[in-house]
């Protein structure tokens, strides 16, 4: 018979992983200066034509991105709530620069699913209203993963 700690560990490893991100993009201008203007620690930028991660795919736009680390959860809304809370102190700067530079705003919820365990796709009305207040789109993607595949491998 397996130990309770082993079963709990297995369940934790099978819980879906969700990464929430917010991106500003532009086809016309680079966005490196936004790192200082918005002042959100951990934000990154990229340039049109750069390779995406370790793939042969190239970026189609210039961009600025703030994303939270992967978290194990069954609720997409939980990950989104944490992201919106992190962005809240910078909301006015984000909205001002988005309008001034005519940028596109995007929220993304990337999910890694293990053993057919999918998180709930529920989004609270408050979070939906907040996304709308940024004038942003929302993308939610689900990628099946092998149980023994680590977050860094993908």
Image (cartoon, rainbow, N blue to C red):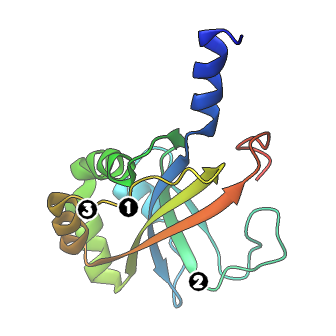
**Going 75% across and 44% down the picture, which residue do you hit?**
152
Q: Along the horizontal axis of the image, is 68 left or right of 134?
A: right
Compared with 22, 27 (above or below) is below
Separation (CA) of disc 3 from disc 2: 21 Å
In the image shown, does 30 or 83 lie closer to the viewer?
Answer: 83
Mark 2 / mark 1, whichever is N-terminal: 2
Give the x, y percent position of residue 150: 75, 40
Q: Position of residue 42 (x, y in %)?
A: 50, 46
First-in-chain label (3 vs 2): 2
Residue occupying image coordinates x 74% and y 80%: 58
Q: Which residue bears the numbered disc 2?
A: 61
Front of the two marks 3 and 1: 1
Q: Nearer the viewer, residue 45 or 66?
A: 66
In the image, residue 29 above or below residue 47: below
Label 2 and label 1: CA atoms lie apart by 28 Å
**Front position in the image: 81 or 106:** 81
Circle 2 crowding by C-alpha within 10 Å: few under 14, some 14–19, many from 20: some
Q: Residue furthest bottom?
A: 28
| Residue 98 picture location, percent across and down | 31, 76
Q: Where 11 falls versus 86 (above or below)?
A: above
- Mark 2 or 1, which is nearer the eye? 1
The local secondary structure at tag 3 comes to helix
Identify the residue under disc 1: 121
Please state the horizontal and vertical placement of residue 5, each as a whole percent of the image. 61, 11
What is the secondary structure assignment of the residue under circle 2? loop
């Amino acid at each position: 018979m397996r130990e309770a700690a082993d079963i709990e560990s297995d369940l934790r490893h099978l819980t879906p992983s969700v990464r929430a991100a917010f991106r500003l993009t532009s086809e016309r201008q680079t966005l490196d200066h936004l790192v200082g203007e918005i002042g959100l620690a951990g934000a990154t930028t990229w340039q049109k034509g750069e390779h995406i991660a370790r793939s042969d795919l190239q970026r189609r736009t210039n961009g600025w991105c703030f994303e939270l680390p992967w978290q194990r959860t069954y609720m997409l809304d939980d990950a989104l709530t944490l992201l919106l809370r992190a962005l809240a102190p910078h909301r006015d700067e984000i909205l001002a620069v988005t309008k001034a530079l005519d940028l596109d705003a995007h929220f993304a919820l990337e999910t890694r699913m293990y053993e057919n365990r999918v998180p709930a796709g529920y989004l609270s009305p408050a979070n939906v209203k907040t996304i709308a207040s940024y004038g942003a789109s929302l993308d939610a993607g689900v990628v099946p993963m092998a149980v023994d595949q680590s977050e860094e491998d993908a």
